């Protein structure tokens, strides 16, 4: 499972958010990067948009060089990182 369709969240899961749906079914969440959310290759990516109080995308910039950009992502979640 890599994503939840809005129709199914609204129709069958009472309007749950994707993170709530993963939790409901005992699954670890998947984080996807979409351009409107701030793709990892964008210089001004806002990784905070992927985070909630319980699930955080903690990013360390290893190299900001546009030809060799390296980010280290740690997903902090309720049961650990």
Image (tube, rainbow, N blue to C red):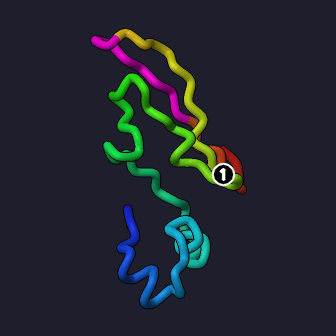
Residue at 40% x, 39% y: name it. Answer: 38
Position of 6 relative to 74 (above/below)? below
Q: Where is residue 23 in the image (x, y as percent from the top left)?
A: 60, 71
Q: In this view, does 9 lie above or below 31?
A: below
- Residue at the outermost left position: 67
Asked whether 19 or 2 is in front, the reply is 19
Occupied quadrant, residue 75: top right
User: Which residue is at a point 69% across and 55% down the rendered structure image?
Assistant: 54
* Numbered label tally: 1
**Residue situated in front as seen by the camera: 48 or 77:** 48
Image position of 33 with respect to 40: above or below: below
Q: On the rendered image, what quadrant is the N terminus found in?
A: bottom left
Measured as percent of width and height from the top left, residue 33 is found at 38, 45
Task: Please state, as top left, top right, bottom left or bottom right, where the C terminus lies in the image.
Answer: top right
Q: Residue at x 36, y 81 (%)?
A: 7
User: What percent of the width, then of the height, locates residue 36?
Assistant: 35, 46
Residue in the image at 60% along x and 35% along y: 58
Please check the rendered image and state whether residue 16 is part of the magenta-colored stretch, yes or no: no
Q: Is residue 73 above or below residue 4?
A: above
The residues colored magenta run: 66-73
Q: Does the magenta stretch include residue 69?
A: yes
Query: In the rendered view, does 57 fall on the left or right side of 78?
Result: left
Residue at which label 1 appears: 77
């Amino acid at each position: 499972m890599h994503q939840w369709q809005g129709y199914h969240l609204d129709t069958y899961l009472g309007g749950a958010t994707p993170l709530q749906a993963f939790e409901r079914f005992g699954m670890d969440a998947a984080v996807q990067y979409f351009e409107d959310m701030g793709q990892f290759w964008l210089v001004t990516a806002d990784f905070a948009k992927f985070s909630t109080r319980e699930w955080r995308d903690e990013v360390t910039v290893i190299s900001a060089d546009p030809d060799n950009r390296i980010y280290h992502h740690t997903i902090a979640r309720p049961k650990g990182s």
